[in-house]
Image: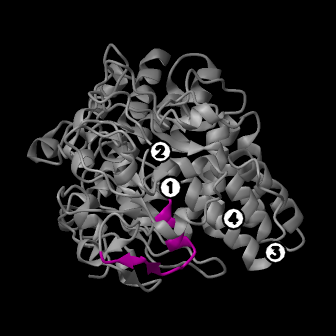
Amino acid sequence: MKKIKLYILALAAGLLLVPQSCSKEFLETAPTDQLSGNLVFSSIPGAWGALNGVHRSMYIQYNSSQAHGGMAGMYLYIDMLGTDVIFNTTANGWFRSAYQWVDHRNDRSNMVLYWTNIYRLVSNINQIITQIDDVAGAESDKRAIKGQALAYRAWAHFMLVQLYAERYAPGTANSQPGVPYMESITFDGQVRNSVADVYSKINADLTEAITLLDGYNRANKSHLNKSVALAIQAQVALVQGNWAQAATSANAARQGYSFMTADQHLEGYNKQNNPENLWASYVQEDQTMYFYSFYAYMSHNFNSTAIRQSPKSINKELYDMISTTDIRKGFWYPNAVADKQPFVQSNGVRFNYMNSKFQSVATSDSRGDFPWIRVAEMYLIEAEALARQAGKEDQAREVLFLLANNRDPQYTLSTNSGQDLIDEILVQRRVELWGEGRNWTDLKRLNLPLERPTGPNAGQGLHVESYAIKISEPAGTKNWLWMIPKAETDTNKELEQNPV
């Protein structure tokens, strides 16, 4: 891999200074490992400042790209590849070529630069992991800092291996090329670890993180506590088909968290202190996000051209599966044009089935505390993992009931079994996590094809073929792989590119 430089500079506010592009200036930046011993890791407050910088790097702008609004931008790209987010028009071009399955197959596109973005994060994290043990100070602080860094490293490689490698196939050797698992500070090009090896290292990091974070009480939900590490462990186990681990970790992760109220559902999924948030960014009022925020593209109220010209809708087939008494049904407006709902700018357009799930802080303020992991996902993981284990369907139904009945008071305990029960859980997952970056990676982990329902006109809750271009894709083809950025493969001759 390219010589990934370190960007931890301890500012007075304890934040991270990260360059905006992968330019010549980026390549010529002096490695701050020459500075970190004096400026960052000389004290516990300095180490906390470095970690706070990592928290902030989850939502800063990368590569001077309006579409690279932190890691939430990556989740936007993921959902644009799936079945359940509908583009109603080509009037606004943001994410359109991703939606058409062009950008992730282009090694020069901005989209694939999330490879570089995530490895920048890993470089910062590794500085913390490799140096925190030698910092003088309270052992409890050092455990909390290192535990969070290890959980971040696991999450970062988990995202990379899902996007840039073939799917983990349970029950097989998984010897296919994965991604380089960076555990040390090095400027030498690295080969790709196998998918099996990547997951082994992810799990090792999470196991240690869970131990270190035991008893840690965080300041806010942008910090990673034991519950977050367990939640990531549950996500990883689900992808691996390790059903017992997925169910156990998801159950442990959700302990101590409650469901949001009906009113909180309508607040726009933008507050880190929402009771259901296990992990969410905390974007302070003075940290303006301008037009690179997730909410500048997926909210219904921010005053941006992406929203005024191209509000996103839900797949009608999925919408029709939602009960009329389910509070989530109100996130989308099947008759938005006639009913003049939801609120849009006076010069904006409406399309039927457009969403109001997400809201920015205000029409002139694109901020929002993006929810990286919500407790609802833990119920869904636990239910699915139980349903896939012999003799545990009754438990799966009971766990599913807890979530589904909270969303829909008229929901009754499921009588489904076998694949029908699993399918019911997966529909609940699609509804619950709509727009939160899970749809396409779920298709990939389940080895399902892309099948986008189509219609002749926009505003029908269906993909318009002339807009979408990509309507179907068989499972398991090379097109399910993101290309590695050309700049990386040009620099690192050890790095094997994905098939064109």
Q: Residues within 10 Å of mark 4 (few under 14, many from 20)?
A: many
Mark before the other along the chain sequence, 1 or 2: 2
Mark before the other along the chain sequence, 3 or 1: 3
Amino acid type at image mark 2: Lys
Q: Mark 2 points at which residue?
A: 357
Amino acid type at image mark 4: Ile
Mark sitting on residue 434: 1
The residue nearer to you, when weighing 35 against 164, is: 164
Rounded to the nearest whole Å, what is the CA distance between mark 2 and mark 4? Answer: 21 Å
Rounded to the nearest whole Å, what is the CA distance between mark 4 and mark 3? Answer: 11 Å
Kindly check if marks 4 and 3 are in contact, taking CB atoms under 8 A apart as contact: no
Quadrant placement of the C terminus: bottom left
Asked if the magenta segment contains residue 440, the reply would be yes
Q: Name the residue under label 4.
A: 425
The residue drawn where x is 30% and y is 36% is 302
Rounded to the nearest whole Å, what is the CA distance between mark 3 and mark 1? Answer: 25 Å
Amino acid type at image mark 1: Trp
Mark sitting on residue 7: none
Task: Tell me where residue 359 appears, x and y as whole percent.
Answer: 41, 37
Task: Tell me where residue 215 appears, x and y as whole percent.
Answer: 72, 27
Task: Tell me where residue 63 appears, x and y as whole percent.
Answer: 20, 46
Quick one: which residue is furthest to the left in this view? 24
Q: Name the residue under label 3.
A: 417
The residue drawn where x is 24% and y is 33% is 290
Asked if the magenta segment contains residue 271, the reply would be no
Identify the secondary structure beneath mark 4.
Answer: helix
